[in-house]
């Protein structure tokens, strides 16, 4: 709920141009906003904020982050409590509909998702166009976009029921598509969903089973994977969610908008950081492991090196990312279950974290581990190949993307997103004849 504040902001100009009052709005928690919607009409001036460091693009009821406290709330519930007391599908219900399901709602929601896990048989032929060594995110971007070809006619985004079934289809089908992308790259047959398994268990079977033998879901890994999905489910107006909102604001179908989110998440500054982080740990290991951490850190601190400590830093968190703490605990559990307590990369990661948290360069810049720092280690231990890490992130983030998209489309005030610019190029000039160019 946006509540008008009784505080006003007054904008005045030193050249005597007309000043203007700007209304402020308060949210439930977090920073107030200055409403600048009438600024251009009244002053002929834009605001300038290329990385959206100080810009609220929308009002939302879904996720709240306090970067200074290192707090993350999904619909008001702390991530630490959800990760321990709920499962991923409960969290999906919470993000989509605003509250945790009761027993009947839980049974109904789990049933609806389970009954939409298969994809059209034609989808398998779409994969054949890719090389077997194609990056899974390239495949997934294509597959998610291709879903719109199967539901384009049945998706009137202005119809709340259509928006809801599109959300269920996307949540249900992402594990199937990610597993298909993986199976295609390893040349194994696709495994169909199995409805008597949990969401995470079904994904594990589609990933690791073959038609040649029965597959037994390891409950510790199943729980760890489900928690990984919860931790990645939503995160306010991050780059990929903002991409989905902007793409969806044109009225395109939800499958196309989510495909845009998948493409954005792939970047190493965003969801691609988990893959980049594991590759970084591997490189340090090859350099000599813990003994070479100091040398690596010197590269990171040298601006000209272009080397970043992947899995560290965050636009919003200027304290420890609460998801990183939970991911580290999950790491301990999974490595213990698999007898990999002495995993060298996990030991290296913990040493790297210790050194970074004591180093002035990182302390001064408030750089802490983020969600991507430990997620790669636990996924590798589970047997997920490094190039698939970001696809797993996309699988989990799909519910956040679609919840945020549906929130925007459901807001009668929403408009197509159309930012402006500060133009610094050539002013008007005439085209010279070829002989004069
Ligand atoms: C995700 O937005 C979200 O919510 C994203 C996410 C989600 O759930 O959706 O949380 C998921 O994307 C997590 C972030 C994953 N990315 C990485 O781990 C890649 C490494 N991190 C950096 O690229 C960086 O920290 C960003 C991109 C995450 C944030 O960049 P900002 O906010 O633009 O910060 P910045 O680049 O302005 O950094 C401030 C300073 C700079 O130094 P100075 O110019 O002040 O001297 O800190 C330095 C940066 O050079 N810095 C780093 C660093 N991150 C920032 N230096 C070394 N290693 C790093 N990782």
Image (cartoon, rainbow, N blue to C red):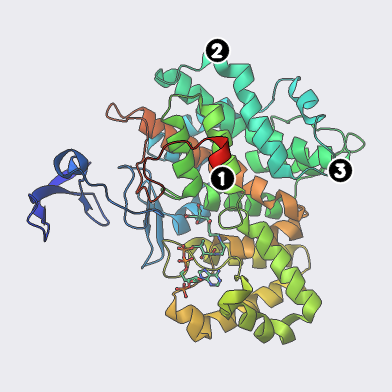
Residue 134 % position (x, y): 79, 42
- The quadrant in which the N terminus is found is top left
Q: Is mark 1 within 8 Å of ligand 1?
A: no
Residue under the point 64% across and 79% down: 299
Left or right side of 397 for 136: right
Look at discs 1 and 3 and give the one toward the viewer: 1
In the image, 341 versus 350, the foreground residue is 350
Q: Secondary structure at mark 1?
A: helix
Residue under the point 27% across and 56% down: 30
Question: What is the crowding at mark 1: few (fewer than 14 residues within 10 Å), some, or many (at least 20)?
Answer: many
- Residue furthest toward the top? 153
In the image, 257 versus 216, the foreground residue is 257
Question: What is the crowding at mark 2: few (fewer than 14 residues within 10 Å), some, or many (at least 20)?
Answer: few
Numbered circle sitting on residue 153: 2
Numbered circle sitting on residue 186: 3
- Mark 2 vs 1, N-terminal side: 2
Residue under the point 40% across and 40% down: 429
Return the residue at label 1: 264
- Mark 1 vs 3, N-terminal side: 3
Evaluate if marks 1 and 3 touch, with contact meaning CB atoms under 8 Å apart. no
User: Which picture quadrant has residue 290?
Assistant: bottom right
- Residue furthest toward the right? 212
Evaluate if marks 2 and 1 touch, with contact meaning CB atoms under 8 Å apart. no
Residue 338 % position (x, y): 77, 63
Q: CA distance from mark 1 to mark 3?
A: 25 Å
In the image, 72 versus 227, the foreground residue is 72
User: Which picture quadrant has residue 37?
Assistant: top left
Q: CA distance from mark 2 to mark 1?
A: 26 Å
Q: CA distance from mark 2 to mark 3?
A: 34 Å
Establish if 342 lies above or below 136: below
Q: Is residue 74 visible?
A: yes
Q: Secondary structure at mark 2?
A: helix
């Amino acid at each position: 709920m946006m509540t008008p504040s009784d505080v006003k902001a007054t904008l005045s100009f030193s050249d005597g141009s007309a000043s203007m009052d700007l209304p402020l709005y308060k949210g439930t928690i977090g920073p107030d906003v200055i409403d600048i919607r009438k600024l251009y009409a009244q002053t002929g001036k834009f605001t300038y904020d290329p990385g959206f460091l100080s810009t609220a693009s929308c009002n939302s009821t879904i996720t709240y982050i306090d970067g200074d406290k290192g707090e993350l709330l999904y619909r008001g519930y702390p991530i630490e409590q959800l990760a321990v007391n709920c499962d991923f599908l409960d969290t999906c219900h919470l993000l989509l509909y605003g509250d945790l399901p009761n027993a009947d709602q839980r049974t109904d929601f789990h049933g609806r998702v389970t009954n939409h896990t298969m994809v059209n048989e034609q989808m398998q032929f779409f994969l054949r166009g890719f090389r077997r060594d194609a990056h899974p995110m390239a495949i997934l971007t294509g597959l998610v976009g291709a879903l719109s070809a199967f539901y384009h006619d049945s998706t009137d985004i202005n119809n709340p029921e259509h928006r809801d079934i599109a959300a269920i289809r996307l949540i249900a089908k992402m594990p199937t598509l990610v597993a298909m992308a993986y199976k295609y790259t390893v040349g194994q047959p696709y495994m169909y969903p199995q409805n008597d398994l949990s969401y995470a268990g079904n994904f594990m079977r589609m990933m690791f089973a073959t038609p040649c033998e029965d597959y037994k879901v390891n409950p510790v890994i199943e729980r760890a994977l489900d928690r990984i999905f919860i931790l990645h489910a939503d995160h306010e107006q991050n780059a990929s969610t903002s991409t989905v909102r902007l793409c969806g604001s044109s009225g395109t179908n939800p499958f196309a908008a989510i495909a845009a989110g998948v493409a954005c998440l792939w970047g190493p500054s965003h969801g691609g950081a988990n893959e980049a982080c594991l590759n970084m740990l591997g490189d340090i290991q090859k350099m000599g492991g813990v003994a070479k951490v100091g040398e690596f850190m010197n590269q990171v601190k040298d601006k000209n090196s272009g080397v970043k400590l992947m899995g560290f830093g965050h636009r919003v968190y200027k304290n420890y990312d609460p998801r990183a703490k939970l991911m580290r605990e999950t790491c301990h559990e999974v490595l213990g279950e698999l007898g990999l307590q002495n995993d060298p990369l996990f030991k290296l990661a913990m040493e790297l974290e210790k050194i970074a948290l004591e180093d002035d360069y990182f302390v001064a810049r408030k750089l802490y581990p983020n969600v991507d720092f430990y997620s790669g280690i636990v996924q590798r231990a589970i047997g997920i190949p490094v190039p698939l890490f970001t696809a797993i992130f996309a699988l989990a983030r799909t519910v956040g993307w679609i919840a945020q998209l549906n929130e925007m489309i459901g807001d009668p005030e929403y408009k197509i997103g159309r930012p402006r610019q500060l133009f610094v190029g050539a002013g008007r000039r005439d085209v010279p004849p070829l002989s004069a160019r």
